[in-house]
Structures are given as structure tokens and as C-alpha cells.
Image: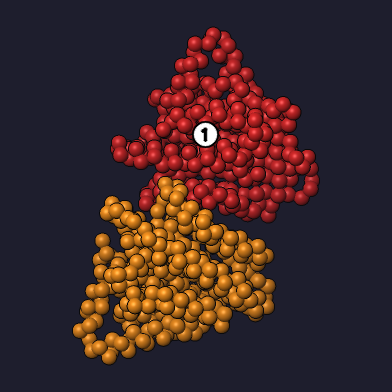
Chain colours: A red, B orange
Amino acid sequence: MEVIIRSHFLHSPPLSILSSFSSLQLSAPRCIMMNTQKQGRSKFLEFPFVSAPHKNLLVDLVTTIEDRFQSNLLPCSLPPHVQHYKNKSDTSQISLQITPGNNDSPIDFVMGSWVHAELPTGGLLDITSLSAYLNTSNDAPNFVFDLIRSSPTMLIFFLDLLPRKDLVLCPDYLKTFYDDTKLDTHRQTLENLSEVQPYLSSSLFYRAMASPTAIFVRISTENDGGDRIDEIIRNYLDPITKQVLGIWLDHCACAKRELGEEERASLGKRDCVIRNKTIEYDLGSSFPRMFGPEAAKEILEAIKEYFFMKT
Amino acid sequence: MEVIIRSHFLHSPPLSILSSFSSLQLSAPRCIMMNTQKQGRSKFLEFPFVSAPHKNLLVDLVTTIEDRFQSNLLPCSLPPHVQHYKNKSDTSQISLQITPGNNDSPIDFVMGSWVHAELPTGGLLDITSLSAYLNTSNDAPNFVFDLIRSSPTMLIFFLDLLPRKDLVLCPDYLKTFYDDTKLDTHRQTLENLSEVQPYLSSSLFYRAMASPTAIFVRISTENDGGDRIDEIIRNYLDPITKQVLGIWLDHCACAKRELGEEERASLGKRDCVIRNKTIEYDLGSSFPRMFGPEAAKEILEAIKEYFFMKT
């Protein structure tokens, strides 16, 4: 499952590439394009396989971001078969939305996805992810969120404001975005629950990439059919995630950062390493596991184009 | 106690400063200087307040490093009152040894210390630390080790090869020193013990500074007078620490790294941030707590000189 968890990092199409997708699709009849956009977005916001508190949290997060940036976000212009893909045997499906920021926005893109898969063991796996990446006009952290339910009584929860600079070399950055915002209090609140255990990624790169206030936990409850997990989502994960998103919106996405040309180049280089390293991990493993090698290849080739055309 | 734990990071006198200390002391009669060196080293190697397995581990680590680098390490030339300090009420004492590398060595310095303090609560606190820092001829990680016993049944254990580069920007560095050396297996071995829990520093900077394979744990056993803790030291901490030190000696300290002038300058800058930030944390808090404000000031002023004269 580790590799599946990483799928939320497939979020890195550069604005230029996304814009070229938009331009290409403008040659299609406008009504078809708009229908595709609406259908993809509606399907995404259904979150049809997760519990009510889980769905409510995701919908609130998406609409909070959209409300804040409104006219600065362009519609998702991914090809329809990438926006929603279901394998032939109907055992796995993915819904994917990428909404790039326009040229006046500090947002590079916002990406949301859900994956539903029947596991070979007979269990069900639901991965819901939302992330928001800034462009190089702003070196503030990116927002990443994953909620993975692998059984009614087991959750993996990952929430972080991913640093975009070397925190050791930049203590002011650490202070501004992590210490002063008291981000660590949210991790502490959650880890006080008896059902919550720290969870370490098996990838050293993912550990190195995370902030020191990252929440990365496994939540495991007694066999009550899922009631306690849903209570934890409603009473803890929901308010904590919304507070962290609030910090990101108020203190990161809207931060006024003065960056010189050299700083922007370094930032772009570091962003690029993370994005490329992410593809390397994901493309080789999680998608084939979820959709089988052939179907995975079809989706992933489309996504790969974003990344490989980038450099 | 958190701030006390950080005291092992007070390890950063540059070679040039240490050499000037040596030069100054050469004007003293040679026999007095040699006696001071011998007395300080003997006192340090006594580890008089810790259990046999704890002392054996420390002595083995120190002699392993000394045996490997022998003629490349200069004698400790700290002033006697910094090599061993005891407060007036005899409730706290520190033994400190810094052995700098000579000009032909990749070692900047090796620092070992033990602190013994009677706590206001009536308990005893014993901190034993050993670290080995490389100079800018070699960008490989530094070795850091702390074993802190705050009661017969409670230990804090910190063991890491501290990265000296931004691991996100340098995936090859991560692969060479952390993945290929299978460093994470030692953390996993230890965390399988029921008495072991992950321990997070309250300082975000310290978390950010650590490697993704850092072992930072709290070990808490039932009230058996300390037998089980000593068993864990002998059967787990001892072999794990020796294996990690072996990795550091074979793969880090002796690594042949080709560094350009610019890389060395960047490395020096990053090393310097860590060292200065460390002083900032430590000087203001742990030493005064352990030795009272006046005595702490006396020791710390001597140590401060190393750091402030450095830049």
C-alpha cells in the first residue's frame, strides 16, 4: 500500500503544459468541452465509495480552495479518460481533477483524486487525496492531504505543508511557516488519541521531503464496523485538516514573498527534483498494482507527458 | 530535559581555533600540559555514574574511533575547568573531551562528554554523548550519539548520521549514505521492542536536521531496578551503535569525495548554520539548568569563544 499512498504526489504538471492542453481542447466544440469538464468535476465530487464524514471533509476542502481562488483557477482540462478511469473488470477506478492557476495566481495547480479498488484479499481500498502546489513566484510550502481507508477500522492519514526549501539552511522559513503557525499542535492533538500511531513511509526520500510537523499516522480501531473511525474523522481529522488548510491559505498561498531570479531558479530546480522523483516511484509501482499493467500504462503515459515535457 | 539532550551539539570548534588553543598552551610547561590532557581523558573514560553495559559501550566507541584515526587526532586542549567541571554543591558535573583532527585528516573534531546531575525531584540524570564531525574536505554525514538515562527504567537514545546536504536536492547522497548502507534496518530492529517508542524533539529545527533513518526513541521498562534497560543496552543499543559507527567509519569518514571550491563553501555555510543554531538553543537553556546560571556562564563563555571566533 505504501506505493499507493505516494500517488498523491503525481501532481506536478507545469502551468505551461496545462495551458497547452487547454489550448488544444479549445478547438473542440465548446459545449463538449464544458460537458466534459462538468462531468469530470461532478464525478470527482461524488466521492461515492467513502463514508459521509470522509466525503464531507473532502468536499469542504475542495470548495474552500475553489471559493478562495475562484477566478484564478482554470477548469480541469485533462483528457476524459484520465479524469475518470475504470478498469474492465470494474474492480478499480480513479477520478482525477487538476485545476491549474492562471497567470496572475501564485497557484501552480490544485489536484484532487480518489481511487477505489477491490483488493485481491477481498477488502476494499479507498484513497482520497488533495494537494495544492504553488508556482515559483512564491516559495511558501505546498499543501498535501491523503486519507486512505484500507478497511472499516483502518486509516492512514497524511497531512503536511511540504517545505520547498532546505529547512536547515533557512531557519527563518522554518520559523515563519512551521513554528509561528503552531502547526505542531495539530499533530500533538491527534497523537494523544490511543488509536493513533506514527506511521513511517518506507521511502527515505518521502521522509526527507516531509516537514518536521507532518502528520503521518496509522489509525486503527476495534472491530465496530467503522463507527469509531468515522467519529475520529468527524471530530479530529476534519477540524485539524481545515485548520491546516486555513494556515496554508492565509500564511502560505497568500504570502508576499520577494524572490530574486536566482532564488526562483533554485526553487524551480528543487520543485522539479521532487516531482521527477515522485514519478519515478509512482509510475513504476502503484498504478500498475491498482489498474493492472495495461490499463495503468494508458493512464500513466498521459500523465508522464506532463512531467517529461516539463524540463 | 529536551534542552539537555541538545547539549551534544555543542561540538563545533573549528580546527583553526583549536590549534590556537594548542599554541597558547605550548607556552605552559610541557609536563603540566600533558598531565592536564591525561587527567581530563582519564576522568572522561571513567564514566563513573552509569551502569557497566552503558560504560562499556561508550569506552568501546571512543577507543574504536581513536584506534582508527590514531595519529590523525590531536590531544584535547580544552582548558582544565572546561574538561571537567563540578558545581559548588556537587550536584552536577560535566566531563568534556574534544580531539580535533590534524591537517591531513577528514575529521574536524571528535567530541565526547558525560553529564551527571541530581534533579530537583531527587532523581539522577546521566547524559553520555559522542559525536564525530568531518571538515569540508568531505561532505559525508557526521556521527552523533546520545544516551540519556533519567531513571533506572527510562532511557532516551539518539543515534544518527547527520546529513550535511539537503537530501531532497541530493537523492544520490541519500542513496549512498542511507539507502545503500541499509541504515534503516537498525531503527526497525529497535522499534520492534515493546519497550521502545518513537521520541520527537520539541525543536522543529532538530527534527529538520536529523536524517530519515535517525533513531530517536524513548525506552521505558517496568520497575525492575534497571535490569531490563541494561539488557536492552547490552543486547540492542550496543551492537546497533557499533554497526552504525562502523558504517560511518567505513562509508563516511573514509569516503573519497571530490568537492569543488563552491561545494566546500556551501557545505561550510550549512555546517555553520547548524553549529550556530545549536549554540543558540543550548547556551540559553540546558547548561544554566544543569549548573546554575553562574557556573554555566563560566563554562559556556569558554565554549562560546570557539563558535563566535569561527566565522
Q: Residue at x 42, y 60 (%)?
A: B141
Indicate the position of residue B291 as horizontal and vertical percent values.
41, 76
In the rendered structure, which amino acid carries the disc numbered 1? His
Q: Nearer the viewer, residue A197 or B293?
A: A197
Q: Position of residue B69 (x, y in %)?
A: 38, 74
Most extreme residue toward the bottom, as rendered? B31
Q: Quadrant of residue A122?
A: top right
A146 vs A60, nearest the viewer: A146
Q: Hey, which quadrant is residue B304 in on the image?
A: bottom left
The vertical placement of A122 against B114, above or below, is above
Give the farthest residue toward the left. Answer: B27
A112 is higher (above) or lower (below) than A28: below
On the image, numbered disc 1 is attached to which residue? A11
Residue B140 in the image: x percent, y percent? 40, 60
> With A269 as the anchor, is A261 left or right in this view?
left
Instruction: Pinpoint the chain carrying mark 1.
Output: A
- The residue shown at (53%, 44%) is A160
